[in-house]
Image (spheres, grey):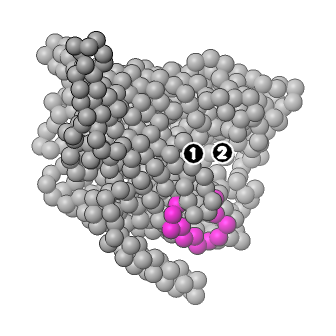
Amino acid sequence: MTKKFHKAGNLVLTVGLGIAISMFGTTKAHAIPSFARQTGFSCDVCHTVFPHLTPFGKDFKLHGYTMDTSKAVQSDASNNNMPGLDINKIPMLSVRIVSRWNNQAGGQQTVPGGVVTGGQGFMSHPGGFGDQDVLNLVGDSSIYVAGKIAPHLGTFLELTGIDDEGGSLGLGIFDLALVGNDTTLGSKRLVYGVRAVNAMDMGDPSNTFGMWGLTSILMAMSTHNTLFDPNQAVLEGGELYGMWGDFDTGGLYASLGVYNPSANQTGNGFVQGNIATNGSFEGSTGENGAVRLAYYIPTFSNVHTEVGAYTYFGPESMLAPTASTVGIYKDNFLSYGIDAQAQWITDNNLAELFAVFESENDSKFYGSDAFGGTSYATNGTSVSRTGIGIMADYYFRRTYGAYLKYFYRNSSQVQDVDLSGLAFGLSWYAFQNADVRLEETIFNKYNVGAVQYGNNNLSAGDFDVTAVKLEYVF
């Protein structure tokens, strides 16, 4: 009883602190401020609730972040047979700062690591903290270089990792887009371009994938970290994309991507081989590919709807540390999924629903199911996983909101990856650039944590988390 009252007191104190701090929020926490300065539009023109995009925001991303209404330094040197010049007078820099408090139910003695919830994007994982209650005044913050470089060239570059626990600055998101001139095909607009990226499907206008995407709810389904898991491996890749039509009257988006691991993740890189071991990631034996298709249904009664499908595929060279006679082996990886979203956007009301289903298969797996006690050290079994993620939110005047997230993943062969649960929260945008959230995450099943700490007697409830987060961007 005393512990519960102590926890409630901490929560009230922290909420009060977060609200007080948010009153001094500066410029913005939901879109990237350099985009707002470049376009002259407020955050809610491009975003419903960050990172979700409005149809206009999707079109801005589709065009490689190049839409510009700001003053620029321009010159036409064509008479001198020299290239022209078009440079923004404003800087492309923005800063995001996250302050948060987390309380994990299990505490330090039961679960040494703790779990962190990332708010709307939802990224939870064991590890990172040594106490039950953690307050970070600066946690997981970022610097952005984002916006128009030239009339048809734009970028979104994130440097992240800054925190008050000694974290160092490193590359987060990288997206460089070169976009062609808008043209027509039949009676509809055609937009096309090419992107250099360091994450799968970075150019997807629905933000279904990656760090801020819907698939992050599934929290990396693989039994070993692959190129295809959000927030796991760093890639070097390119994407060719196009869209026929638009986001309001109906349009079809398609992309084809080719990827390889970055140089620091081949050979003796840091990415884990199989989940129960610390083997090395040996790189790709060939190009890995991704195909994305999405159809945007014509808007009806302020409802914007999308349905899509995607697939990732390719070979990977893996190390089998539990099977010394096997050594490096070739693992053929296949992932496919379907997703859908609906957004109801009016002057006073915003309601959204997002859903994704994903299936993954590794042709071979050498390792152990630590949770189930089964060893696959020598037989190279085929491993499959499925996952479901659902998100819903409602906001009044884009200010006061509530959201709910359901996440599930399962493998009948390797139970280490099994989890299911709910996250729900309340959100207050004191300003368009400052957001305070109170979130509760409740796990029904969390085998990942039991494996992490080598204790199958841990209950899923030991990993439940209460979190308060303040995020502001300027």
- Residue 338: % across, % down: 40, 32
The amino acid type, in three-letter code, at marker 1 is Gly
At horizontal 27% and vertical 29% (from top left) the residue drawn is 86
Number of other residues with Cα within 10 Å of mark 2, as a class: few under 14, some 14 to 19, many 20 or more: many
Whichever of callouts 1 and 2 sits on the residue coming sooner in the sequence is 1
Quadrant occupied by the N terminus: bottom right
On screen, residue 28 above or below 101:
above
Magenta segment main secondary structure: loop
At horizontal 67% and vertical 66% (from top left) the residue drawn is 130
On screen, residue 163 above or below 1:
above
Residue ranking furthest to the front = 80
239 or 371: nearer the eye? 239
At horizontal 61% and vertical 28% (from top left) the residue drawn is 261
224 within the magenta span: no
The amino acid type, in three-letter code, at marker 2 is Gln
- Residue 42: % across, % down: 22, 51
Asked if the residue under mark 2 is in contact with the one under mark 1, i.e. CB atoms within 8 Å, the reply is: no
At horizontal 43% and vertical 80% (from top left) the residue drawn is 12
- Distance (Cα) linking label 1 and label 2: 33 Å
Which type of secondary structure does the marked residue at label 1 adopt?
A: strand
Tell me: 390 left or right of 433: right
Q: Which residues are magenta?
A: 128-139
368 or 70: nearer the eye? 70
For residue 170, the mark is 1
Quadrant occupied by the C terminus: bottom left
Number of other residues with Cα within 10 Å of mark 1, as a class: few under 14, some 14 to 19, many 20 or more: few
Which type of secondary structure does the marked residue at label 2 adopt?
A: helix
- Residue 416: % across, % down: 67, 46
Name the residue tied to disc 2.
Answer: 415
